[in-house]
Amino acid sequence: MVENNLSPVSITSNLATRFIGQRVIYYPRLTSTMEVAKQEAQLGAVEGTVVIAGEQTGGRGRIKRAWLSPKDNIALSLVLYPSIVYLPSLIMLASLAVVHTIETVTGLRSQVKWPNDVLVNGRKACGILIESSIRGNIVDYAIIGIGINVNLKLSDFPEISSTATSLSDELGMDVSCLSVIRKLLVEIERLYLALQAGGSIYEEWRDSLVTLGKKVQVKSGKTMYEGVAESVARDGSLLLRHPNGSLTKIVAGDATLRG
Ligand code: BTN
């Protein structure tokens, strides 16, 4: 097993960021980093504060799913206070930061399945959950939760082994969670600062989507849609072309690739 000391100092020491990850709170075992990050944000934690768990006992996924989060993988939540105009871009920012990080640290190519699952060789290696508190036009806080299957042995988890993968299973060797976290924090800050400086990350996010041009089934709330994923709008919505030619704009949902 590679060195996986995730103490705050091992993460923050000489970390090449101005504020993302300069404050790290680490728990060996936690219900969910989302809960602690939310409490931190409500108490006015400095922007860029990161909550990391060695393992989570109640990891949460999107649409009320559970997120499997045993040790030797990454479970972290990041506290941000973005302007409301950047809120839709956080999904794009987080998934692109993960794609860049995986490639730099492991050499593996990954793709994004709309809206923000990161796939390696067609299977999910990372899930992202964004929760925010908004009042009128003011964002009180946004929490980006990122779970990466780093050293998960999928043979131990047959219930997800047909749809999920891990970096170590893909590479055939263990991967350092510390290296992945440090690179991820640098990447998130680079993209966040670029966004605030007026740059756009929409085009790169759109081009990294494995979903476009494919037949998909999308569950949004209680509605199930089927069609071809034609494009994505700048606000991150999916434009789905139905067999009868009509187009639906889906703001949030979960897509399954068909065939
Ligand atoms: C999904 O794909 O449904 C999103 C999964 C998000 C999991 C991460 S792990 C860190 C953070 N804490 C949680 O409880 N969930 C997110």
Image (cartoon, helix red, strand yellow):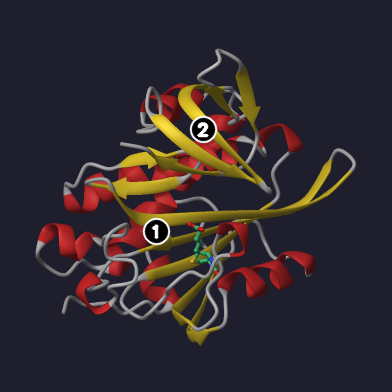
Residue 16 in sight here: no
Q: Residue furthest top?
A: 245
User: Taking 125 as reference, is 120 above or below it?
Assistant: above
Left or right of residue 13, residue 52 in this image:
right
Task: Give me the residue at 30% from left, 68% from top.
Answer: 177
Task: Give me the residue at 22% from left, 53% from top.
Answer: 105
Mark 1 C-beta closer than 8 Å to ligand 1:
no
Tell me which amino acid carries mark 1. Leu
Instruction: Indicate the position of residue 69 as horizontal and vertical percent values.
Output: 42, 75
Instruction: Indicate the position of residue 98 as horizontal and vertical percent values.
Output: 38, 48
Instruction: Indicate the position of residue 4 as horizontal and vertical percent values.
Output: 27, 77
Residue 213 image-quadrant placement: top left
Task: Give me the residue at 45% from left, 24% from top.
Answer: 228
The label on residue 173 is none
Residue 23 image-quadrant placement: bottom right
Q: Residues within 10 Å of mark 2 (few under 14, many from 20)?
A: some
Which residue is label 2 attached to?
226
Left or right of residue 98, residue 116 in this image:
right
Taking depth in this image into account, of 210 and 234 the one nearest to the observer is 210
Taking depth in this image into account, of 86 and 7 the one nearest to the observer is 86
User: Taking 228 as reference, is 1 above or below it?
Assistant: below
Quadrant showing the C terminus: top left
How many labels, in total? 2
Quadrant showing the N terminus: bottom left
The label on residue 15 is 1
Q: Residue furthest bottom?
A: 29
Residue 181 image-quadrant placement: bottom left
Left or right of residue 183, residue 199 in this image:
right
Q: Residue furthest left?
A: 172
- Helix, strand or loop under label 1: loop
